[in-house]
Image: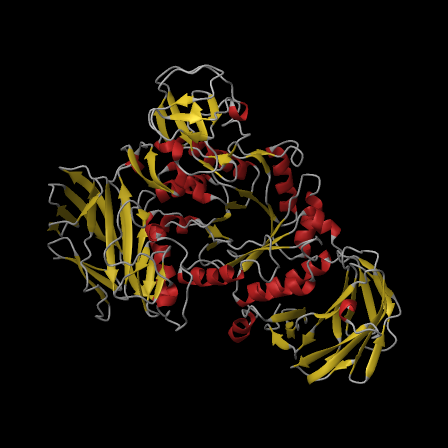
Amino acid sequence: MFTIGTEHLTVEINSEGVVSALTGADGARYESKSHPSPLLRLVTNGEMHSPLQAAFDAPAGRITLSYADGTEITVSADNRGSYAAFEVLSIANGSPDAVVWGPFLTTIGGSIGESVGVVHDGEFAIGIQSLNAKTVGGWPLELDRHESMPESYSQGERPNPDGRQMSDNKFEHHVCTAWPTLDEGSGLQAFARDRSKPATRPAWNLAATEIIPIEGEDARIEGTRLALFGCPVGQVLDVIEQIELGEGLPHPMIEGVWGKKSPAANQSYLITDFTESTMGDALEYTKKAGLKYVYHPDPFVTWGNFKLKPGSFPNGDASLKACSDQAAAEGIHVGIHTLSNFTTLNDAYVSPKPDSRLQPVGTSSLTGSIGAEDVEVGIANPAAFTAELFRRTAKIGDELIEYDSVSESAPWRLLGVKRGANGTAVSAHEEGAAIARLWDHPYDVVFPNNELQDEFADRITELMNGANLKQISYDGLEGVYATGQDDYGVVRFVERQYRDWKHEVINDASIVVPNYLWHVCTRYNWGEPWGAETREGQMEWRLSNQRYFKRNFIPPMLGWFLVRSASDRFEATALDEIQWVLSKASGFTSGFALVADYAVLKRNGNIDQLLEAVSVWEGARRAGAFSEEQRERMVDPKGDWHLEADGPGRWKLYPVHIPKPFVCSPTELQPGQPGGSDWAMFNKYESQPLRFTLRVRPVYGNEDASIKRPTFYTDGSYMTFDTEVKANEYLVCDGYRTGRVYDINWNLLRTVEASADAPTVRHGGQNLSFSCRFEGDPKPEVNVKVFLRGTPESVGSGEE
């Protein structure tokens, strides 16, 4: 028996090389009784083998595992106080393709941190951590999963420690460091490959891909390292921080505090397409929002060489550096968006001479020579060329070709071939010449292999350092899977940049979270606004993300939210929409991104009002001003809130009810009925003056229509605005006698006085009557949104 007694967890390994006991400091046992947990399995030719026996050198902290094929693996096992560290020191008498740590099966099944590799039951946690890039949290994709683990699962199949059900696990089994077991427990797993060997195995979305071997230390299984720990739940981050510092892992600091604990890690930010000439305006908008980061969503004209758009940055990197310097003088940081290793077809790595290091799905050879005019190409093996991808692009020497299809039988031919694709030179090719099917994607891009990808990483690093950029997002990080090197390739790409940054950087990534990358990335900001109303855009996804962040100890973010100008599909963004976003962010203590094109910032008349709301809400959120009870209520997607500053360190929080918009349509009036409607309304709050936004909507495209003398009646009082409101205009009343008329993008056109003060909306049920004179043929429709506010609640400590 070999025993490592760490501060909170004792690990025992028996003579068969099995982790036979996981014992807490209080004597509680956490190892699974259903299945054994070998310390290290080996994989050869697609088959996995457990050790037959283990020999121990306790004074030296060495374990030698012996396997049926004669392979012997020596592992070091060191007690580091709060955790145990294991490392494969040597492999003798064999050459396995991979080794698998565990899975270490536990009885804990409450909270499963699939990315961080930590499981807990609300009180005690057990976790593993990959200690270098070659050690991948997860499971080899080509292997059947362990018999103890279901094919898929939902977090909702079992309660969390807080008793709530969840249904939001994000990833497939093979990329998860933690996974549930069929007996209501969990398993913790990691692996390392011999990456020096050529191979064919599944990669990304393809069942079989030719894997290009790599060289260097990371290609060897020897040196794979893993930490195993147990501790009270409240100490998980403390232990992981000790692991990072003790093992030389990435340990990013944000404003002087470790990123996973720093209050600054989940700062919100403004995304806008600034240029060197408009940077001053972008900074003013950022300051109005009370934010410290402004981020460019699409700065590059090509991806690969990452050449900046000359129209926006005429002097290339120097122009972006000038923007960053200008921002720094205002106390603001600049960031950029990337698509990681996505390589555009106009990039110099692709055209006019394709780089030899573009990633193939697979290769074959020409079965006959072809001249410059040939549009059928004979190939020896069609496998890679029938793979279901977006484009059908192949590389022969320095020429790219595109083809329509592959012949249905031998002799195999590429049919409908377009020669000299993407501006490459057409040339003759000899029989036997190599032809490679390039890996592509619907974004109309191809991908680099690992070697070329390193150049991509170095170019991004050059730009980050040279332009003093403080924020980056690795969107499209899943594209790195095209290298065939699974999450190792992902980690290699990002860590290479992290290690060479010369300053602090907030960084996040797309939906790819390897265990080791957890240490590098500051946060993840998922949730996109495209093609849906603000309150609807991926809302379930955004909410489930908050639970994912919590169980994975990741600073919470709520995603991107779009500020719109008016279009055929959507209205221009209104204040209540932004306050809805801000209340959810405050409820979850989450940061977010506010996306507004520069043209929108200039076009929309309410931008200052929207940004001021961001400043007020973010000031309160980052001050920790909201109580837990208030935050719990604010996360309800159906709830609306309004926040006002109330002196230094103080705010007033108003619950808001917005009934479904009332509609008055002249097409639904009875013959002879004057223009108007009676709407039933319930006010659950105390009596208050009527607040509303009225919009005149054109019908059948008649934008010359209008309404005149809009009148509201309730509680025995009339309120008439002696004015005309045209199609696509708004009339707003905030409970006062004065109203404001805006155009379709919230630019103020004029103020108007009503005939009387705003009528009172009583507590309880009542009718709200509306009338007006409709003008035009066809006549317009009127939509009225009423805002009801509850009694304000005090927020904050009153301290500056």
Give whichever of 699, 111 is nearer the camera: 699
Looking at the rendered image, the quarter that the N terminus falls into is bottom left
In this rendering, would 497 be left or right of 85?
right
Number of marks: 0
Give whichever of 715, 313 is nearer the camera: 715
Looking at the rendered image, the quarter that the C terminus falls into is bottom right
> Residue 244: x and y, percent?
36, 51
Residue visible at 23% across and 70% down?
A: 28
> Residue 156: x and y, percent?
39, 66
> Residue 584: x and y, percent?
56, 65
In this rendering, would 764 be left or right of 149?
right
Visible residue check, residue 616? no
Q: Residue furthest front?
A: 671
> Residue 630: x and y, percent?
55, 74
Which quarter of the picture shows residue 127? Answer: bottom left
Which quarter of the picture shows residue 177? Answer: bottom left
In this rendering, would 793 be left or right of 717?
left
- Placement of 790 over or under 229, stated as above or below: below
Residue visible at 71% across and 54% down?
A: 566
- Placement of 55 over or under 350, stated as above or below: below
Give whichever of 40, 58 is nearer the camera: 40
Q: How is the image coloured?
A: secondary structure
- Placement of 76 over or under 383, stated as above or below: below
